[in-house]
Image (cartoon, rainbow, N blue to C red):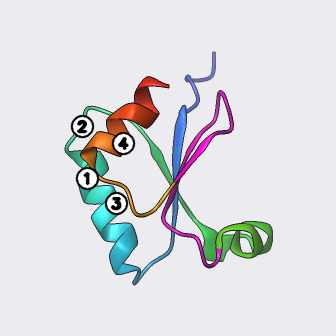
Amino acid sequence: MPGKPFQYILFHTDACHLCELAAQLLDLTSLEYEKHDICDDDVLAEQYGIRIPVLKRTDTDKELNWPFDMDKLQEFLGA
């Protein structure tokens, strides 16, 4: 039986300081999330290239765009 898919995805790329800040903020929570490097996928690069970091909720397809703080993150997670 396959494992449960991640409900949250952080779209990022290497050498992105803002992406590192977003990941650090997420790591302060108990949230389990998957990181997708947009440079590995042309479609993702086109969609998120100038918007990263972006946290996507896969069950609703809602997205939280940077900048976000802990309050905005908690509100998004509770949505």
Tell me the amino acid under the disc marked 3.
Answer: Ala
Q: The residue under label 4 is which amino acid type?
A: Leu
Q: Which of marks 3 and 4 is nearer the N terminus?
A: 3
User: Which tag is nearer the camera, tag 4 or tag 2?
Assistant: 4
> How many C-alpha atoms fall within 10 Å of the one at disc 2: few (<14), some, or many (≥20)?
few
Residue indicated by mark 4: 73
Q: For numbered disc 3, what is the local secondary structure?
A: helix
2 in magenta = no
Tell me the residue that label 2 is attached to.
29
Question: How far, Cα to Cα, is label 3 from label 2?
Answer: 11 Å
Instruction: Kindly identify which numbered label has been placed on residue 25.
Output: 1
> Which residue: 66% across, 69% down?
48
SS class of the residue under badge 2? Answer: loop
Circles 4, 2 touching at the beta carbon (< 8 Å): yes
* Residue that protrudes farthest toward the bottom in the picture: 15
Q: Which residue is drawn at 65% across and 27% down?
A: 59
State the separation of the CA atoms marked 1 and 2.
Answer: 7 Å
Which range of residues does the magenta coloring cover? 49-64
Tell which circle, 3 or 2, labels the residue nearer the N-terminal end: 3
Where is 2 relative to 12, above or below?
above
How far apart marks 4 and 1 lie (CA) works out to 9 Å
User: Contact, CB < 8 Å: mark 3 with mark 2?
Assistant: no
Q: In this view, does 11 lie above or below 50?
A: above
For the residues bearing labels 1 and 3, Cβ distance under 8 angstroms: yes
Callout 1 touching callout 2 (CB < 8 Å): yes
Q: Main secondary structure of the magenta part?
A: loop
Identify the amino acid type marked 1: Leu
Could you tell me which residue is drawn at 45 percent across and 36 percent down?
Answer: 76
